[in-house]
Amino acid sequence: LEAEKSLSAFPNPTSGSFSLSLNNFSEGEAIVRILSSAGMKVMEFNVESLDATELKQIPVDKLENGVYIIQVTVNKAENYFTRIVVAK
């Protein structure tokens, strides 16, 4: 029985940066996209490892206040989504 995979962002809401937590994922690479509530891509980066340091401090201080959708594509196959609120 495989544990359920999940994606979460914290702190939420955030004013400067946030971390992503990927639970029950095995090894792999990921593409992280941050989309505006209108679906426009505002940030994208790749990580070679699912426990990469880049997932621990994702800067959003240059983004406008609002709700953003976080999309993480794992191993070019599986998509996971969560939301983050930017409030300064």
Image (cartoon, grey):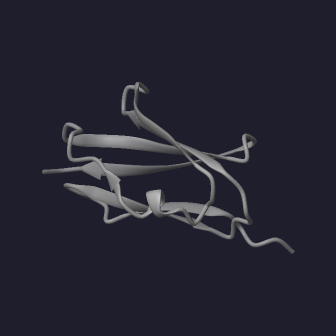
In this rendering, the answer to whether 64 lies above or below 12 is above
In this rendering, the answer to whether 3 lies above or below 27 is below
Residue 37, percent across and down? Answer: 36, 33
**Number of marks drawn:** 0
Depth order, front residue of 51/6: 51
The quadrant in which the N terminus is found is bottom right
Is 47 positioned to the left or the right of 63 in the image? right
Residue at 45% from the left image edge and 57% from the top image edge:
54
Is 87 positioned to the left or the right of 44 in the image? left
Q: Which quadrant of the structure image shows residue 69?
A: top left
In this rendering, the answer to whether 68 lies above or below 84 is above
Residue 76, percent across and down? Answer: 72, 40
Residue at 55% from the left image edge and 60% from the top image edge:
7
Residue at 71% from the left image edge and 67% from the top image edge:
4
Residue 56, percent across and down? Answer: 42, 64
Residue 36, percent across and down? Answer: 36, 32
Outermost residue, left side:
88
